[in-house]
Amino acid sequence: MPTLMPKYLIRLLFVASIATSSIVGAIKCVAADNAVEFVVGDYLVSESGTWNADDSPLRGPFGIDFDSNGRMFVVELTSGRVHQIDVDGQLTTISEEKPTGYSGDGGPLAEARFNGPHNCVVAADDSLLISDSWNHCVRKIETDSMTIQTIVGTGQEGFSGDGGAAMDATFNFVMCIALNPTRDVMHLADLKNLRIRNVDLKTGVVTTVCGNGQKGVPVDGSAAASSPLVDPRAVASDSLGNLYVLERGGNALRVVRTDGTIHTVAGDGKKGYRDGDALKAEFGSPKHICCDTAGNVYIADDLNGAIRRYDPKTGQVTTLLGKGHGDPKISLLHPHGVRWYQGTLYVVDTGNNRIMKLR
């Protein structure tokens, strides 16, 4: 049984590879003040560890989320695979790698094809929703029956459908999806349409809430729905109704407030690396965001290999992991995913094929 000892916490961490039916395990000593615990993976050889990213059961993980039983779901962009990791650490691949395509609706997940599953969210009914980016749609997996259907988009690129049924609307590269805290509204980063769109999951109606389809930096205090955007990469909302928009090329974090106005809250627009005053902070092509219950925003800062936090109360940006912060041994490679779950921040270290959590 795991035991607590002075300064060290002993844990058994393991992951099963369904393809080989083998279990890779290690008993790890983690310092009590260490901010990081590995879910999949370990310290790299370059970090004075033994982990080789090529030996991971994951290949380029992008998005993760959790169901009501604590199971983690993982999507991989390039391979198109979907995994489930049970609370006991067993990994099961529920959708194997197949040629890219758009097929399978109404049938078993095992036969479906994706074209760039970028991230995922778990709905209130425990179904798994996946942004199928180059198919310009959102797919829904019923995790009890393992069947799939499209619930947003037609599979064709375009811009249409606002005010009507989301399943009849068109989109252009659905990069990221997120749910509001009550999980009755889905936010979509409609990247190439330069818009953020909402889908009411009760009515199925889609609307644009941010972006007018033109490329540019929005003016602070202007109406979000009639403002330009640089490239809305990711989106997240907090418990107060604020909607955060992350712009990768714009190297900035913006917020749509409850009055419908948009404001830049972090990032000076230049590519770089700087903490401190949020409006003077710099990012390096940030990829993904999430909010915690206190309203903080966590940012996967891709090219900087760092996890950053924006605190709206203090107006400060700080680095939590990477660049020598947090656990100084850890070097992140293209982190593409962050997820807040039950008081813990989970980080997808995409380039190193591992997942960790910050305590």
Image (spheres, rainbow, N blue to C red):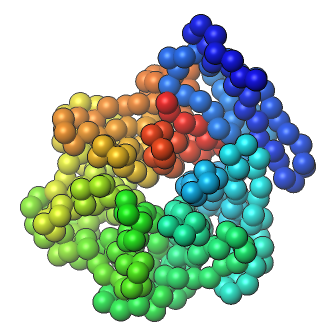
Q: Residue at x 52, y 42 (%)?
A: 346
Splitting the image into 4 quarters, where does residue 351 fall? Answer: top right
Of 324 and 346, which appears nearest the observer? 346
In the rendering, at what x and y percent does residue 32 appear? 54, 16
Describe residue 203's horizontal placement relative to residue 74 as left or right: left
Describe residue 211's horizontal placement relative to residue 158 as left or right: left
Q: Is residue 342 visible?
A: yes
Q: Residue at x 44, y 52 (%)?
A: 287
Farthest left residue in view: 221
Relative to 191, say whether 44 is above or below: above
Of 253 and 207, which appears nearest the observer? 207
Which image quarter holds the N terminus?
A: top right
In the rendering, at what x and y percent does residue 68 appear? 57, 57
Relative to 115, say whether 217 is above or below: above
In the rendering, at what x and y percent does residue 336 appear? 51, 49
Relative to 315, say whether 210 is above or below: below
Splitting the image into 4 quarters, where does residue 36 fall? Answer: top right
In the rendering, at what x and y percent does residue 255 appear? 23, 57
Relative to 155, say whether 2 is above or below: above
Q: Is residue 249 visible?
A: no
Splitting the image into 4 quarters, where does residue 234 fall? Answer: bottom left
Total marks drawn?
A: 0
Q: Residue at x 32, y 71 (%)?
A: 196
Farthest top residue in view: 6
Q: Residue at x 39, y 85 (%)?
A: 203
